[in-house]
Each structure stands twice: as structure tokens, then as C-alpha cells.
Image: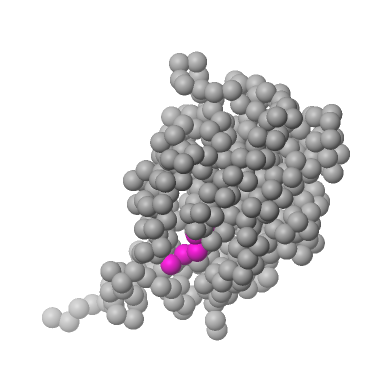
Amino acid sequence: MTSKLFSPIRLARLDVPNRLVVSPMCQYSADDGSATSWHLAHFGVLSASGAGALILEATAVERIGRITHGDLGLYSDENEAALVRVIAHCRAHGFARLGIQLSHAGRKASAQKPWEGGKALAGGEPRWATIAPSALPFADGWHTPNAMSGADLERVRKAHAEATVRALRLGFDLVEIHAAHGYLLHQFLSAVSNRRTDDYGGSLENRLRYPLEVIRAVREAWPKERPLGVRITGQDWLEGGIEIEEAIRFAKALKSIGVDYVCVTSGGLTATAVLKIGPGYQTDLATTVKREAGIATRAVGLIATPQQAESILADGKADMVALARAFLDNPHWGWQAARALNADVMRPVQYQRAAPEVWPGAAYTETLEKPLPAVAE
């Protein structure tokens, strides 16, 4: 039987060789938004991981939209130039379709890198003023952001469109907008973080307004034959926060303005949200959005084994799956999954000697516990 995970999918006019996606994962290793040698090595490996698509990490559309000093950006000519070499390397040696996730951290910006503590930058560290829908801090001990003015709204909307134009020049296959994990567009969407009294706050219709304006601006700048996706939240895990019904409304609105798929995640809006985490814990959110909104969906969240990923797709729960830390643990996870599911993926010519059909050792690597066969003396 043909593996569903390794079957192709068409998004807009882009043919993607399989439904396995490397999820965007911040590396906190950029220099004023510009990619470094770490990104060349990291994305170079993941582009040949067996995944059909690789989405670069959350990439800030303006300098103050970075989470940390190490965030990737696409707000300057230097940022754009630094990605040229990375993209060329991935095209030359990898096979994944390449996407970029555009983002603005809003009130979660001006923070330490995770390995430095992950908290708001302190007084002795270079920090910057942040913006948000309302002047509400992310957590106790965090800076209070400035409520966005009309000029801020226009600048950030324009910054998304300009970053999209840069992505087009770089030759990305798809663009994804980050409207989840507590970042700026998510902050507008949730009543927990959006207390505005103008046309951008209050009712769900008003809270949807600014994110939809931003995404329309991106859609206008991005060719219709290339996919546009949005990462949305299916649940805030907070009283008064987003629940699945609001996520469905958002997904329907996105579909109506030309968005091709949504990736459904959850949490991240505040430091106090308590998520009920378990294997595939967000898949049901993606399933409900897929069914009710009629849009292609991507499931994400503690998807770790080939069989688990296969069953999500074979059962029609989502159209794609995205893995994050599984690929950090095993950058060739896609090769392992293809072997487990009796499928095949393309490999760089330099690594083709490790394909199962030519390397007997592949059969011995399914589990660490499986003993090697006896060798005749």
C-alpha cells in the first residue's frame, strides 16, 4: 500500500513531493537578522532530510519584531543578501520545497535567547521598546509594550508586504504568516491580549480585522500560483481566550482572501497558559478546522513516529504534518520514516550509498535493541 505521508500534495500551483514538513524552528543565531554559517549548515541538512517542504524559522519583518537579538530577519538588504547563499545551497543539495515564515513578536520581543534564560531583556542588556495591540505585558516581570498607533499599524502591515517581496526575489516556493504562539497577530486575535476600543478590538470581527489586513497585503505581494499559508492557534488554553470556534471563523476568513493552507497549533499567548500535552495533542484542532472551514490543514505538536504521522494522514485528520524537535533529534527523520513505511525519498548523491537497497546495515537500525545477526566465521 502506498504511504499517505510520502504521497504528493499540490498547494496552489506548487507540487510538493510528500506531506512531511520541517516546522519552523527559531535558531537564535542570526546577526542583526542576517543568516550566518549556522543557518547554512542547519538548513542545508534539513533540505535533504526527506521532508517535502522545509519552512525557515520565524523571520522578523522589522528589527523590533525580533524575539531576541539572534532572530532571523528579512527587513534589510543585508538580511536578504545573507539568505542568497543559504537558499542556493539548499537548492543545490536538497530536495525540499522551501518556505519562509514571516513574523512579528509584538510584546514577546526584546527577550533573551532560550539558553540565556528566555526572559525579558534586563536593564544591563541592549533592549528595545515593544509594541502590541494593547499595553499589556506578556508576563510578570516583562516590559509593558506600547499600544500600537495608526502609524504603527501601517508600518507593520507594510513591513510584511516588503518582506514578502524580498522572499519572492529570493525564490522561495511558499510564504507562511505567523499568527500564533502569542506573537503580534495572535495578540490581535485573542480577547485576552487585545483590549482595544477602536475598530481593531472588541468583537471577533474587529479582532480579526488587522491580521486579515496584513495577510491581504501579503497575498497581494505574493503570486497566486505560489502557496500562502498561515499558522493559527486553535486554542489559547486560557479563560476568555481563543477556542476552536474562533479558529474556524479565522480559517474561513483566510480561505476567502486566498490563503491556501493553515497550520493549527495552540498556546503561547501568556506565560500562565497550561497546555495538556501528549502525543499528537493538537491534531484534533487541525481536524476540526479542516472539516468546518474546508481548507487544507497541517497538524503539528508531538508527532514523533512514522506510524503516528502516517495514521494522521491516512485517517484524513489533516493534509500535512509538521515535525520540529524530531528533526533536531534526527535530521534524517524523513529517511527513517520512509524506510519504516516502505516508501522512498530522494537523497544527495553523496549519501546514496546509505539507501536501504544498497546498504544492508539499514535493516539493523530500526531499533537500538534489535541484535545484529550472527556472522559466520
User: Would you say 28 lies left or right of 282 here?
Assistant: left
Q: On screen, 356 above or below 254?
A: below
Residue 97 is covered by the magenta coloring: yes
Residue 219: percent from left, percent from top: 67, 54
User: Would you say 68 lies left or right of 239 here?
Assistant: left
Q: Is residue 181 visible?
A: no
Q: Is residue 111 visible?
A: yes
Residue 345: percent from left, percent from top: 43, 73
Q: On screen, 355 above or below 217?
A: below
User: Would you say 191 lies left or right of 223 here?
Assistant: right
Q: Which residues are magenta?
A: 95-99
Quadrant containing the C terminus is: bottom left
Q: Nearer the viewer, residue 214 or 120?
A: 214
> In the figure, residue 346 lies in which quadrant?
bottom left
Residue at the outermost bottom position:
1
Residue 149: percent from left, percent from top: 73, 27
Residue under the image location 74 percent in, 30 percent down? 150
Residue under the image location 46 percent in, 78 percent down? 342
Residue at the outermost top position:
123
Q: Main secondary structure of the magenta part?
A: strand
Residue under the image location 43 percent in, 29 percent down? 116
Residue 283 is covered by the magenta coloring: no
> In the figure, residue 146 lies in which quadrant?
top right
Residue under the image location 63 percent in, 66 percent down? 225
Residue 59: percent from left, percent from top: 53, 44
Q: Nearer the viewer, residue 341 or 353?
A: 353
Residue at the outermost left position:
377
